[in-house]
Amino acid sequence: MTRTYRTALGAAVLSAALALTGCSADDGATKTAKPGAPAARGSALAAVDGLTVKGRAPKTGYSRDQFGRGWTDTDANGCATREDILKRDLKDVKFKDKCDVASGTLTKDVYTGRTIQFVRGSSKVDIDHVVALSDAWQKGAQQWDKKKRVAFANDPLNLLAVDSSANRRKSDGDAATWLPTFAAGRCTYVADQVAVKKKYGVWVTDAEKQAMRKVLAECPQQKLPTG
């Protein structure tokens, strides 16, 4: 039997077996979204297409105070938002008092993949705005009233306990200019950004939208967070 005949016969047998089982040769492979393919309903990838695309506006007039001072207790639970996020994101939390977190452990940080010990007063854990305040300012927030900006700055959907060094490196970057070094955290990070920008009507640049699509195409089933 020639090699060509054996190859053809083998291909025919495989094709018949797959037909009988209802499987395809790609079953079991990592699913990624093909270019132009429809995204899963309710996914972060699907939501990207609903974001408004515009150029970045000047940063003129931006200051942290435009979004309120410090961490506002917007949910009226008696504790600052920062403490609420630490309590949500850390494991084995111990409290200094009713609100203030004294210590805890950040496991598998979304930005670095590291496990980091939080100790109040000497911590290497920051609470990051997933969509940076200055990025939002340049993409619509300067047109908001103060109440909406305070809500944005303190919304748990837009807040994440992360490695402080990675947070500094990110600065006010968007998906086109900065992504976590921890590859497994990128889908979560970008999905969170999409959710925040969709909720508040923050626009994206064309380069940012393309970067979001590229990341989320590797995880097309990633759900859009709702907070």
Image (cartoon, helix red, strand yellow):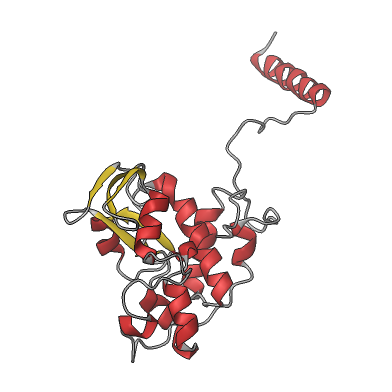
Look at the picture and state if 72 lies above or below 57.
above
Q: Name the residue located 52 percent from the left edge and 58 percent from the top edge.
A: 191
Give the quarter of the figure containing the N terminus.
top right
Left or right position of 3 against 62: right
Look at the picture and state if 79 lies above or below 68.
above
Q: Name the residue located 80 percent from the left edge and 28 percent from the top edge.
A: 22
Whole-percent x and y of residue 186? 44, 52
Left or right position of 198 against 158: right
Q: Name the residue located 60 percent from the left edge and 50 percent from the top edge.
A: 220
Q: How many marks?
A: 0
Where is residue 61, by image quadrant?
A: bottom left
Whole-percent x and y of residue 152? 46, 74
Residue 119 in view (yes/no): yes
Left or right position of 3 against 113: right
Given residues 211 and 9, the one toward you in this image is 211
Q: Name the residue located 35 percent from the left edge and 86 percent from the top edge.
A: 59
